[in-house]
């Protein structure tokens, strides 16, 4: 199901959930990395400063 529904614009990220604290940290890291990638693509001139 994950393979069939994950797309380039809406990717699934599987998070190990045996430990709630660890799972939450993984989710936050994934969100931060996605935001950084999106912001880097939106404003490439910011890297040259």
Image: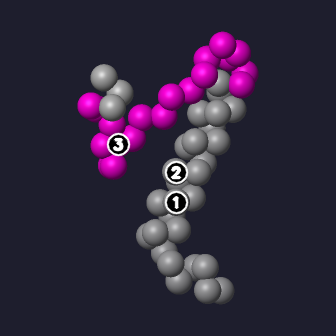
Tell me the quadrant of the picture where the C terminus can be found: bottom right
Q: Nearer the viewer, residue 49 or 12?
A: 12
Label 3, secondary structure: give it.
Answer: loop
Q: Are marks 1 and 2 in contact (CB under 8 Å)?
A: yes
Residue 45 picture location, percent across and down: 53, 83
> Which residue: 28% across, 32% down?
5
> Which residue: 60% across, 48% down?
32
Q: Are marks 3 and 1 in contact (CB under 8 Å)?
A: no
**Residue occupied by mark 1:** 37
Q: In this view, does 33 lie above or below 24?
A: below
* Alpha carbon separation for disc pair 2 and 3: 11 Å
- Farthest residue, direction bottom: 49
For residue 18: magenta? yes
**Residue occupied by mark 2:** 34
* Alpha carbon separation for disc pair 1 and 2: 5 Å
| Quadrant of the rendered image containing residue 47 | bottom right
> Which residue: 53% across, 54% down?
35
Q: Is residue 29 above or below residue 20?
A: below
* Alpha carbon separation for disc pair 3 and 1: 14 Å
**Residue occupied by mark 3:** 10
> Which residue: 48% across, 34% down?
13
Residue 21 picture location, percent across and down: 72, 21
């Amino acid at each position: 199901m994950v393979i069939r529904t994950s797309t380039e614009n809406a990717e699934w990220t599987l998070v190990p959930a045996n430990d709630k604290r660890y799972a939450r940290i993984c989710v936050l890291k994934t969100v931060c990395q996605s935001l950084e990638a999106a912001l880097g693509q939106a404003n490439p001139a910011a890297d040259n400063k």
